[in-house]
Amino acid sequence: MSDSASSQPHKAPLSVACPQCRTPVAWSAASEFRPFCSKRCQLLDLGAWADESHSIAGEPAMDETSIDEMVARMERDMNQQ
Ligand SMILES: [Zn+2]
């Protein structure tokens, strides 16, 4: 008898800190405003950028690649602590 004890490795959901308020945000489809915790923080950040004239007209704020890079960097930072 093969004892297939399904000891699935517990996969902790990846989370990132909201750039605005540092609230942990689950990196999932449910987190609509990731990397921000809420629309409010997202707008605050956009407002901050506009304030410093960093806004790029007609360009998405972030593409998938830079998000992946950011997450990778955050994971590295966390592992270093
Ligand atoms: Zn936030």
Image (cartoon, rainbow, N blue to C red):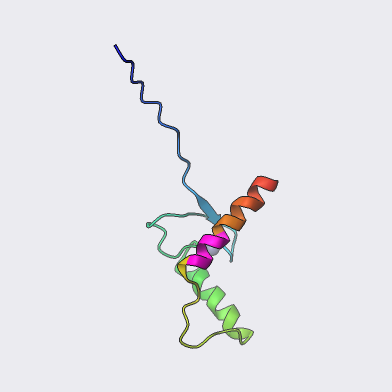
Q: Position of residue 21 (x, y in %)?
A: 59, 62
Q: Residue at point 53% right, 78% down?
A: 46
Residue at the right extreme of this rendering: 81
- Please name whichever residue, 71 or 50, is drawn nearer the observer in this view of the structure: 71
Residue 22's quadrant in the figure? bottom right
Magenta stretch, main secondary structure class: helix
**Image quarter hosting the N terminus:** top left
In this picture, which residue range is highlighted in magenta?
Answer: 65-70
Q: Position of residue 50 (x, y in %)?
A: 57, 84
Q: On the rendered structure, is 66 left or right of 5?
A: right
Residue 52's quadrant in the figure? bottom right
Residue at the left extreme of this rendering: 1
Q: Position of residue 33 (x, y in %)?
A: 44, 65
Q: Residue at point 56% right, 74% down?
A: 45
In the rendered image, residue 81 lying in the magenta stretch gets the answer: no
In the rendered image, residue 68 lying in the magenta stretch gets the answer: yes
Quadrant position of ligand 1: bottom right
Q: Position of residue 67 (x, y in %)?
A: 51, 64
Q: Residue at point 56% right, 61% down?
A: 69
Q: Residue at point 55% right, 80% down?
A: 47
Q: On the rendered structure, is 56 left or right of 30?
A: right
Residue at the top extreme of this rendering: 1
